[in-house]
Image: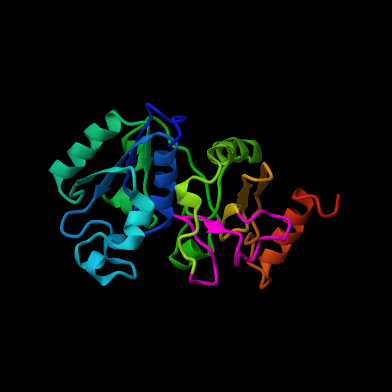
Amino acid sequence: MSSTLAGIRVLDLTNVLAGPFCAYQLALLGADVVKIEVPDGGDLARQLGADADLNVHHMGASFLAQNAGKRSVTLNLKIAEGKEVLRRLVGKADVLVENFRPGVMARLGLSYAGFRDGVVRGDVHDGNAFRRGGVSANAGLFGTAPDVWRLARTWLDLGGAGYTADHTPDHPESRGLAWQRKRGAGSAVAEMSDESFGHTGFTGTSVWVDPRRDRIAVLLTNRIHPAAPDANFHEVRKRFHALAWGRET
């Protein structure tokens, strides 16, 4: 585990996949991640996975894959006492991550403005969020290409740690813990080594890391604004990766 984010405390209010995956990456980089779950069941992912026995015990494979390295507490944010505890926790934290539907935090009285002076506003063009009637920061990678590269550099230096190993050898697509690997990946190219791993986003963004060839490829796009075309975006990624891995240089 890296110590890049040592000393940084993260409050993780997220559920299921995208948010927990985000906070999991911060934990791998050394952050102190405190997962906050609702009483009586916790994260829905606790009941998701192929192992029925694990699901019954609220330790589903989906939950385990995204939440290793985190501390966990339960907190009822619908009552005044729970909200006050969260406010005290926020006062000692550096980051709060949540993936509730748009407006939920505000209805709970826990919007950003309630914790900080001033509000940073922005829109994410996410088709899934649009169909729910709002915008949501849960599609793809966010940041500048240099910033994403610096983050990916840490993963490259880890050089194929256990979380990038193939955990699905009997399936058409090779998957690590929250990572896609080369085998079966629609955006991979032949020039990538078998140790390559990456992540792709709904908006067309992606990052791929190749430890053997010491290569990082970051693609930041917004293919769904102002409308999502009916096209195979993997082909765009593959052309980009062919250039990045030197096929056409």
Measured along the vertical axis of the image, is residue 185 above or below residue 114? below
Question: What residue do we see at 65% from left, 49% from top?
Answer: 220
- Answer whether residue 135 is visible to the viewer in this image: yes
- Answer whether residue 100 is visible to the viewer in this image: no
- Asked whether 160 or 207 is in front, the reply is 160
Question: What residue do we see at 38% from left, 30% from top?
Answer: 8
- Asked whether 194 or 111 is in front, the reply is 194
- Point out residue 232 in the picture as x, y percentages from the top left corner: 68, 70
Question: What residue do we see at 49% from left, 54% from top?
Answer: 165
For the rendered model, the colour scheme is rainbow
- Asked whether 159 or 148 is in front, the reply is 159
* Quadrant of residue 39 within the rendered picture: bottom left
Q: Residue furthest right?
A: 249
Q: Main secondary structure of the magenta part?
A: loop
Measured along the vertical axis of the image, is residue 2 above or below residue 227? above
Horizontal side of residue 189 vs 89, given as left or right: right
* Quadrant of residue 148 within the rendered picture: top right
- Asked whether 199 or 96 is in front, the reply is 199
Q: Magenta stretch: residue 208 in it? A: no
- Point out residue 214 in the picture as x, y percentages from the top left corner: 67, 41
Q: Residue furthest top?
A: 7
- Point out residue 170 in the picture as x, y percentages from the top left corner: 48, 71
Q: Magenta stretch: residue 191 in it? A: yes
- Point out residue 215 in the picture as x, y percentages from the top left corner: 68, 44
Tell me which segment is drawn in magenta.
Answer: 170-194
What is the quadrant of the N terminus in the image?
A: top left
Measured along the vertical axis of the image, is residue 191 above or below residue 215? below
Horizontal side of residue 40 vs 196, given as left or right: left
* Quadrant of residue 17 within the rendered picture: bottom left
Question: What residue do we see at 86% from left, 49% from top?
Answer: 249
